[in-house]
Amino acid sequence: NAGVTQTPKFQVLKTGQSMTLQCAQDMNHEYMSWYRQDPGMGLRLIHYSVGAGITDQGEVPNGYNVSRSTTEDFPLRLLSAAPSQTSVYFCASSRTGPGGYTFGSGTRLTVV
Amino acid sequence: AQSVAQPEDQVNVAEGNPLTVKCTYSVSGNPYLFWYVQYPNRGLQFLLKYITGDNLVKGSYGFEAEFNKSQTSFHLKKPSALVSDSALYFCAVRADPGYSTLTFGKGTMLLVSP
């Protein structure tokens, strides 16, 4: 049981480049979300999904796109990378209901 | 809108002493409350949660948390700290029902000295 798998673990981009951060879970969780972690700011929600075909914006959605074509996958796309998007990105999933989230190990992104 | 406050950026405690990491929350309706721990260059690990029932919740690694509805608090505690407990701790809240998002506090760095 792999849980939540994020790839890549590290990435360096040049300003203006685009890329996709991958997230996959094998627990049949309905709920998936993307957070970014910055020093002193905790984790901030970027986008989330309550099921296949349904996505919504979180607290800091600008510059990011998501889609949810399957229950298992929830990729995060950076359309045109900016230095302000340098951060650690975490994907998480959960069942609907009162349970907690299961987190991936994170992607450390640097935009130069 | 829901929110979480962790008033201390850092908590210092000597090994063997009790520790408390504070958390207060704001949410409409019944709260689901969580504590996560993050070790350096790692993801977040679940410690414990409060959903309903007993106000004292026991979790992993000897940690416990006390839910106080009147003070809207969910402080993390441990009777005897270990150096290996040194890490970044996050409190989080999710409102009933379960489709709502999870909101995190800014985190508290716990440093346990030998």
Image (cartoon, rainbow, N blue to C red):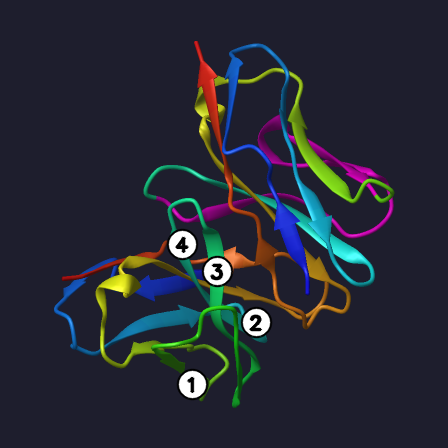
Real-space Cα separation, disc 2 to disc 1, in angstroms: 16 Å
Please give the residue where the numbered disc 4 appears in the rendered image.
A37
Q: Which residues are magenta?
A: B42-68
- The quarter of the picture where the C terminus of chain B appears is top left
Rendering coords of residue B69 (x, y %): 85, 44
- Of the numbered discs 4 and 3, the one sitting upstream in the chain is 4
Q: In the image, which is nearer the foreground, mark 3 or mark 2? A: 3
For label 4, count other residues whose C-alpha is less than 10 Å away and answer few (under 14), some (14-19) or many (20+).
some
Could you tell me how far apart the alpha carbons at marks 4 and 1 are, in whole angstroms? 21 Å
Residue sitting at 31 percent across and 57 percent down?
A87
Is residue B106 shown above or below A24? above
Q: Nearer the viewer, mark 2 or mark 1?
A: 1
The residue tagged 3 is A44
Q: Which residue is mark 1?
A: A67
Of the numbered discs 3 and 2, the one sitting upstream in the chain is 2
Q: In front here: A79 or B83?
A: A79
Task: Look at the numbered disc 3 and give the secondary structure of its residue.
Answer: strand
Counting other residues with Cα less than 10 Å from the Cα at mark 3, is it few (<14), some (14-19), or many (20 or more)?
Answer: many
- Gap in angstroms between the C-alphas marked 3 and 2: 21 Å
Chain label for disc 1: A
Residue at the disc numbered 2: A29
Q: As shown in the figure, which amino acid type bears the numbered disc 4?
A: Gln
